[in-house]
Amino acid sequence: MTPSQRIAAAIAAFNNQRFEQARGLVADLLEGEEANVDALNLAAACARALGQAGEAERCARRAIACAPDHAASWNNLGIMLQDQGRAAEAEAAYLRAVALQPAYADAHYHLGLLYQQGGAFAAAAEAHERALTLRPHHALNSANLGVVLERLGRLEEAERRFGDAVTLDPNDVDSLQRRASLLHRLGRLDEAAACFHAARSLRPQSAELWNNSAVLDASLKRHAAAEAGYRRALALRPGYPDAWHNLGLLYMQRRRFPESLAALGEYRALRPDDIEGLNSLANLYQHMGRDADAEAAYRRALVLRPAYAKTLNNLATLLQRQGRLAEAETVYREAAAADPGYPEPRWNLGFLLLAQGRLDEGWPWMEARYDPALARPIARAPRLAFPQWRGESLAGKSIVVWPEQGFGDQIQFVRYLPLLKAAGARHVTLVCHDPLLPLLRTAPGADTVFGAGDVARLEAHDFWVFMLSLPMHFHTSLDNLPAALPYLAADPVRSARWQARLASVQAAGRAGAGLRVGQRVGLRVGLVWRGFAGHVNDTHRSLPGLEALAPLWSIPNVSFFGLQRGMDGEPAPGTTGAFALTELGPEIGDFGDTAAIVEALDLVICVDTAVAHVAGALGKPCWVLLPAVHPDWRWLVDRHDTPWYPKVLRLYRQQRAGEWEQVVREVTADLATLAGM
């Protein structure tokens, strides 16, 4: 055979992993005058495959000696040197290869791998992108670029590159799984589920895939599927710590506390000194009301890792719930200092300071509420082509006030719009959630009002600002907060209609009570006993049912009206014939109706929900029932009035978690006084 034929035969043997045979076929082409650069490179590859690093390097250097300007030889030498951990020499070899042949895709790719291995991710991305420009259909290159972009935090680009890798190689399970995880993080949950399903079909025995797809199911609240996924992962790998941990967290979320305790026990048996396991166990104890055990677990975790921000934050949350506010503040500050990039303690500290009335201190900390790193961001920054307002001069400028959080927050803080005008803003555009549009359309200080569903028509402005950042920018304290009431008004047409509707109810009441025409049947009192079920604290803030308010019906000359539906789109809980209640909820279309009804009432009695803010903004008396667990910061600590709605809102506070009887007794006594008993 000619040298060319022998090299071709050796390549075929190499591709069939017959490395000794391949090297033997070219043995006489490696030395002396017969030395052949292709044979030497092939011999280097065979030695590398056989684990003979020194011989591989010798052959690669011999190839360069034979042909110093042969780019492939420099690339191969780089591979041999990289294998040995000689990164600087490998980089020099790859750079020599691309200098000799700038369009050499393989050398750019291996240079990218070298930078990736060394943690130089920006350089790695540049090299991988160059390689893909030269060779677009290289699946491994796309996959590695995806890994690098993910490390750089360029998640959407990374997801696209993993998608390219899977398109080029549909059996690339690793890229499928990485893409699924990124889609999960990006909130594209249905696409993530499809990716996990495809990956599991290719690798059904992968415990990791079952565990990770179950995490997605849990986030989609597909609890049965999540439990089945974790159980499948554990059947495949009984000692799989992450699956035990995740299963314990799922049971905790579902309030299946004994099962959660058992699962977390399995996890801690596998990882007894793991901080996350101790944190989860302590969190479970909190949920179970075992505060002493929770605090002990947090403090054990801090012995293992003294300045761990997550543990410090969780401990501070426990201390705050117990009313140990000074201790909680100290620990929150320790957590924030320990990890400035971890937003939870900053948000919680802001909440704590505001609740104590230390408003000017608290507002800057509360800016953490829209940090994307927050486990549950309270607000999300809009994608607008103009910058967020950071306190610059507004003289002659236009600004968009962006909505955030719940309906009540927007009603409470829309009072700040006139301050923007007073600061010189030429044009103030308010964006609000659509159900609020009829109420806020005429809000003082707003030149234009858009519903959130219509923001596509929003024109360019100089700035945008979150609505709840306005108190910070105006340095609001208890001494200067804008509290002139009322600052909103119901639509006159709706008011007339609802006045007539309530009058018709009272007319029927007059007839039933045998009263003269025109004689009013006592007080008109609106009731709201449940808030939006999706609220993070709804378990504590909402009453178990209308029956919790039963003592109110012992007071004569009071007409009760249910406002339970229309604020959050959920149907009213069922009521019984034992309560004489006119249920207006099904007739409420939006907050324009809610405001008109409230204006026609004498009093609103409600839990902490948006109706309280409607009443306050209209200057209508309202009694608000507050839970003992995590009452909202705006009601401050231990007060029975509120500076946000002075002389209008009255606060009734639980003394013990879950016990509403004492609160309802106080409300009943005060209502009896108001009704003239």
Image (cartoon, grey):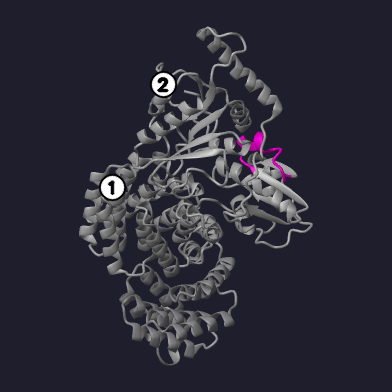
Q: Which residues are magenta?
A: 432-446
Image point (70%, 25%), residue name: 493
Q: Between disc 1 and disc 2, whose residue precedes?
A: 1
Task: Kindly report which numbered mark, 1 or 2, lies closer to the viewer in this rendering.
Answer: 2
User: Percent from the top left, x then y, of residue 118?
Assistant: 44, 76
Question: In the rendered image of this protein, does residue 542 appear above or below residue 311?
Answer: above
User: Percent from the top left, x then y, of residue 237?
Assistant: 24, 54
Figure quadrant of residue 348: bottom left
Q: Is residue 590 left or right of residue 16?
A: right
- The amino acid sitting under disc 2 is Ser
Q: Is residue 290 visible?
A: yes
Q: How many marks?
A: 2
Q: Which mark is residue 289?
A: 1
Q: Is residue 49 left or right of residue 77?
A: left
> At numbered mark 2, what does the secondary structure look like: helix, strand or loop?
helix
User: Percent from the top left, x then y, of residue 380?
Assistant: 56, 52
Taking the view exactly as shown, the residue that stands out farthest to the left is: 269
Image point (33%, 51%), residue name: 211
Question: In the rendered image of this protein, does residue 615 appear above or below residue 127?
Answer: above
> At numbered mark 1, what does the secondary structure look like: helix, strand or loop?
loop
Q: Which mark is residue 554?
A: 2
Please state which of residues 644 and 233 is positioned toward the viewer in this rendering: 644
User: Percent from the top left, x then y, of residue 253?
Assistant: 34, 45
**Label 2 neighbourhood size at 10 Å, few (<14), some (14-19), many (20+)?**
few
Q: Which mark is residue 441?
A: none
Residue 212 shown in magenta: no
Question: In the rendered image of this protein, does residue 307 appear above or below residue 398?
Answer: below
Image point (42%, 39%), residue name: 541
User: What is the spatial separation of the Cα atoms under label 1 and label 2, in whole angstroms?
Assistant: 35 Å
Image point (61%, 39%), residue name: 617
Q: Is residue 566 left or right of residue 16?
A: right
Figure quadrant of residue 62: bottom left
